[in-house]
Image: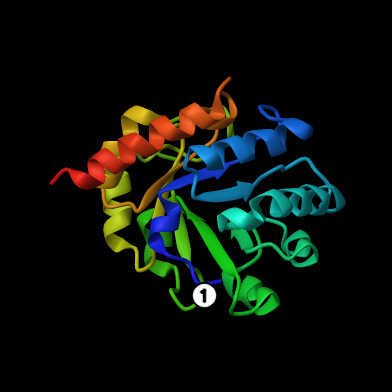
């Protein structure tokens, strides 16, 4: 599918420790009702079989919404479940190899941690970049040194495809993330870790929209 930059506005990354089992579906459905525009299924400890099962279930509940669904780092699961694509890191399969396996019609997102990685990202191969880690986050304790908002702005300026910021982001960061030049923000605990994921998503969307409407 063709990715629109606006679809990255509020990007949800799932965390099995915050929304395990059946709660995953409930959380994602609620978050999409609240305005989440993109979903990444991430579960580093799951097997490919388990990722396929989870992806098929998520695909079923997301179908009517039109919200894209990608799987983190697992091309085999993405192919078997026929989701919209994958999100890969710098140490995972090469983007060109991922594109060869998935074809032209799937979405490929690439994590970038440095300006050099952003500059090298090929717009003929990847559809969007995840920029970060912006701030420290407990959902990815092994992340590289944080880049902060100034580093985020530097990387966003270099990007030749749409970008989404990630890493320790909450409602208060909506304005500075967009002002830095990103098309959206990715969150984990700001939605998955909330008692009311729909309300949390709606609040984040409101903050993003207010920034976009303010010169």
- Residue depicted at x 80% and y 54%: 52
- Looking at the image, which residue sits at the far right? 49
Q: Is residue 149 in view?
A: no
Q: Percent from the top left, x then y, of residue 86?
A: 63, 60
- Closest to the observer, 90 or 56: 56
- Looking at the image, which residue sits at the far front? 64
Q: Percent from the top left, x then y, of residue 196?
A: 55, 23
- Residue depicted at x 59% and y 76%: 105
- Closest to the observer, 179 or 21: 21
Q: Secondary structure at mark 1?
A: loop
Q: Quadrant of the N terminus?
A: bottom right
Q: Is residue 72 above or below residue 97?
A: above
Q: Is residue 24 above or below residue 41?
A: above
What residue does disc 1 label? 125
Answer left or right for 165 relative to 94: left
Q: Percent from the top left, x then y, of residue 11?
A: 49, 46
- Looking at the image, which residue sits at the far left? 215
Q: Is residue 17 in view?
A: yes
Q: Is residue 198 above or below residue 61?
A: above
- Residue depicted at x 65% and y 74%: 97
């Amino acid at each position: 599918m063709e990715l629109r930059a606006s679809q990255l506005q509020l990007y949800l990354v799932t965390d099995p420790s915050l929304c395990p089992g059946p709660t995953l579906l409930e959380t994602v459905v609620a978050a999409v009702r609240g305005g989440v525009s993109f979903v990444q299924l991430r579960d580093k400890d799951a097997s490919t079989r388990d990722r396929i099962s989870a992806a098929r279930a998520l695909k079923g509940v997301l179908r009517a919404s039109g919200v894209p669904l990608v799987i983190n780092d697992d091309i085999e699961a993405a192919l078997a479940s026929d989701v919209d694509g994958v999100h890969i890191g710098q140490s995972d399969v090469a983007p060109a190899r991922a594109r060869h396996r998935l074809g032209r019609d799937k979405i490929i997102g690439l994590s970038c941690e440095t300006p050099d990685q952003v500059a090298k990202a090929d717009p003929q191969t990847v559809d969007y970049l995840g920029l970060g880690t912006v701030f420290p986050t407990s959902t990815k304790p092994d992340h590289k040194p944080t880049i902060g908002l100034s580093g985020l702005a530097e990387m966003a300026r270099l990007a030749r495809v749409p970008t989404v910021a990630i890493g320790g982001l909450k409602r208060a960061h909506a304005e500075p993330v967009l002002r830095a030049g990103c098309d959206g923000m990715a969150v984990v605990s700001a939605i998955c870790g909330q008692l009311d994921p729909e309300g949390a998503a709606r609040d984040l969307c409101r903050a993003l929209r207010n920034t976009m409407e303010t010169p």
